[in-house]
């Protein structure tokens, strides 16, 4: 989604993720993860474990990471918000994990918004 600041892109992405997560719409996704790229944890993540740490220490990050890698991201939807505002994180040579994810280098079967 592209548009000027304040047009509702974040709200739209959050709504889509929420509606699919609560199964209001039929989907094949068993896991939906929403990541605001502007968040410091997301923006500084250099690997999948670092990215998953956005969800805090309440979840077992190691087991979620292992499950994602074992399944190669099958039936998973990753929602990245704010890519238009953080282009430096998704350029070649960036140490951030976002570009390898977007290119399918980490979780080949993951769907991404």
Image (tube, helix red, strand yellow):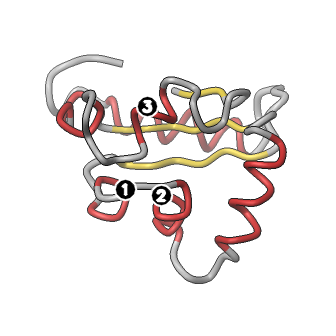
Cβ atoms at labels 1 and 2 below 8 Å apart: yes
- Residue at the spot of label 3: 12
Compute the Cα span from label 1 to label 3: 19 Å
Q: Residue at x 15, y 31 (%)?
A: 5
Residue 53 vertical placement versus 30 (above, below) = below
Give how far across and how far down residue 4 sits, in percent. Answer: 15, 22
Q: Residues within 10 Å of mark 2 (few under 14, many from 20)?
A: many
Q: Residue at x 54, y 55 (%)?
A: 48
**Mark 3 or mark 1, which is nearer the start of the sequence?**
3
Give how far across and how far down residue 111 sits, in percent. Answer: 65, 27
Tag count: 3
- Residue at the spot of label 2: 51
- Residue at the spot of label 1: 42
**Mark 3 or mark 2, which is nearer the start of the sequence?**
3
**Mark 2 or mark 1, which is nearer the start of the sequence?**
1
In this view, the residue in front, 88 or 77, is 88
In this view, the residue in front, 21 or 99, is 99
Task: Point out the frontmost of discs 1 and 3.
Answer: 1
Compute the Cα span from label 1 to label 2: 5 Å
Q: Residue at x 66, y 38 (%)?
A: 19
Cβ atoms at labels 2 and 3 below 8 Å apart: no
């Amino acid at each position: 989604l592209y548009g000027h600041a304040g047009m509702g892109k974040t709200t739209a992405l959050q709504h889509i993720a929420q509606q699919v997560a609560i199964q209001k719409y039929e989907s094949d996704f068993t896991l939906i993860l929403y990541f605001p790229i502007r968040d410091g944890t997301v923006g500084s993540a250099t690997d999948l474990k670092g990215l998953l740490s956005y969800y805090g220490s309440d979840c077992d990050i190691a087991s979620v990471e292992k499950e994602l890698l074992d399944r190669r991201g099958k039936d998973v939807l990753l929602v990245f918000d704010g890519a238009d505002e953080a282009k430096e994180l998704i350029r070649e040579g960036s140490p951030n994990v976002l570009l390898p994810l977007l290119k399918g280098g980490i979780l080949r079967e993951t769907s991404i918004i």
